[in-house]
Amino acid sequence: MHFQDTVVYNRTKDIGSATGTWFAELLKKSPWYKDVVPNFKSLPQEELGPGIDSASSFTSVCINTAIYLPWLVSQCLKHGVKFKRGVVRHVKEAADLHHTRKQADLIVNCTGLSSAKLGGVEDSTVVPARGQIVLVRNDPKIMASTSGTDDGDDEATYIMHRAAGMFVLRMSWSFIRLKGIQGGGCVLGGCYQKGSWESQPDPSMAIRIMKRCADLCPDLTDGGGIERLSIIRHGVGLRPVRDDGPRVEKDVIEGIKVVHQYGHGGFGYQSSYGSADAARKLVDQALGHHAKL
Ligand SMILES: Cc1cc2nc3c(=O)[nH]c(=O)nc-3n(C[C@H](O)[C@H](O)[C@H](O)COP(=O)(O)OP(=O)(O)OC[C@H]3O[C@@H](n4cnc5c(N)ncnc54)[C@H](O)[C@@H]3O)c2cc1C
């Protein structure tokens, strides 16, 4: 997780589009986070490129989730959490997976998009918002995004360079030792296709994403166009969007206490500490004592 210089470019015409709505807070001249993030400022008009109506820059945070998630698992293990893997068809089945073999006192339902289909939950207001990205080795040294594109209402342009990870490779048989920095890669996005379950990357969209990112940030390709991009892989993810926002709520399903915590759409990482804290309080309320979480 690292701090990164960030620029957000706004086009008034994107207000109301799928991407513009997703970026709504970023489009504001005075967003809620302006006094939270360091170095927030509006860019002067003369620094704006063609078609851009306003822009802000600030220092933001970028998480390399490929490193962050295993780290979270290691923190849980350190604190005595027992992991069990399995697929449940009904939420109540989770109660029987407790490592003590006794039924669990309470289930926290964090099944994301699956809450639309999971037995006992079946929340029809949970839908996917498909995102497609291209991961490249190039390093533009900033994070940047635009509020919309001319390629489609639900397409987006954003660049996020992820923090590098350390690697140490030892091969004793040949006495080779390599130490170094494994690049976190740079994420080029994207789109916000609500209702699409398509899990495969669309090659045409990948080209559009790369072109838009190269135009937005010429430093990405040293001004040389998308042929200068070194592609690591293409990716698709489905954001677990819920129409009325995340559901963090107590429930009782077939006699079993449940705390729901799903539907965090495209902001599950940034809202995770607050949302987890809210869920923890609900768990304490439901159990009537302080849970060991
Ligand atoms: C392209 C893209 C870009 C994004 N960018 C950002 C960003 O910049 N910032 C940000 O904060 N967020 C971002 N997000 C959103 C973020 O990834 C999600 O909000 C977050 O991952 C949701 O986490 P979750 O734990 O609620 O759900 P998930 O990560 O979907 O986890 C649900 C878990 O439940 C398990 N599960 C489901 N059903 C069952 C079952 N029946 N039995 C057993 N296990 C089950 C699944 O295997 C999975 O492990 C982005 C998402 C995408 C796709």
Image (cartoon, rainbow, N blue to C red):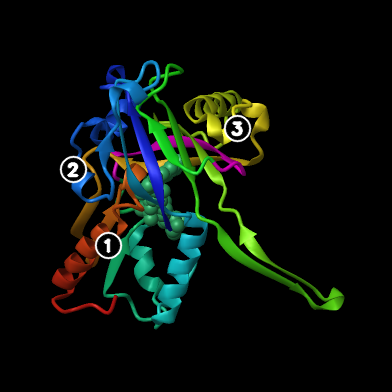
Q: Quadrant of the N terminus?
A: bottom left
* Label 2 Cα neighbours within 10 Å, binned few <14 / some 14-19 / many ≥20: few
User: Which numbered marker is on residue 32?
Assistant: 2
Residue type at mark 1? Ala
- Report which residue position mark 1 lands on: 276
Q: Left or right? Give the position of 110 relative to 31.
A: right
Residue type at mark 2? Trp
Using the rendered view, name the quadrant where residue 126 is placed.
Answer: top left
User: Which numbered marker is on residue 221?
Assistant: 3
* Residue 262 lies within the magenta run: no
Using the rendered view, name the quadrant where residue 26 is placed.
Answer: top left
The answer for how far apart the CA atoms under marks 1 and 3 are is: 39 Å
Seen from the viewer's position, the closer of residues 217 and 210 is 217
* Label 1 Cα neighbours within 10 Å, binned few <14 / some 14-19 / many ≥20: few
Is residue 83 in view from this perspective?
no
Instruction: Provide the residue span drawn in magenta.
Output: 123-139
Q: Identify the residue shown where x is 35% and y is 29%.
A: 9
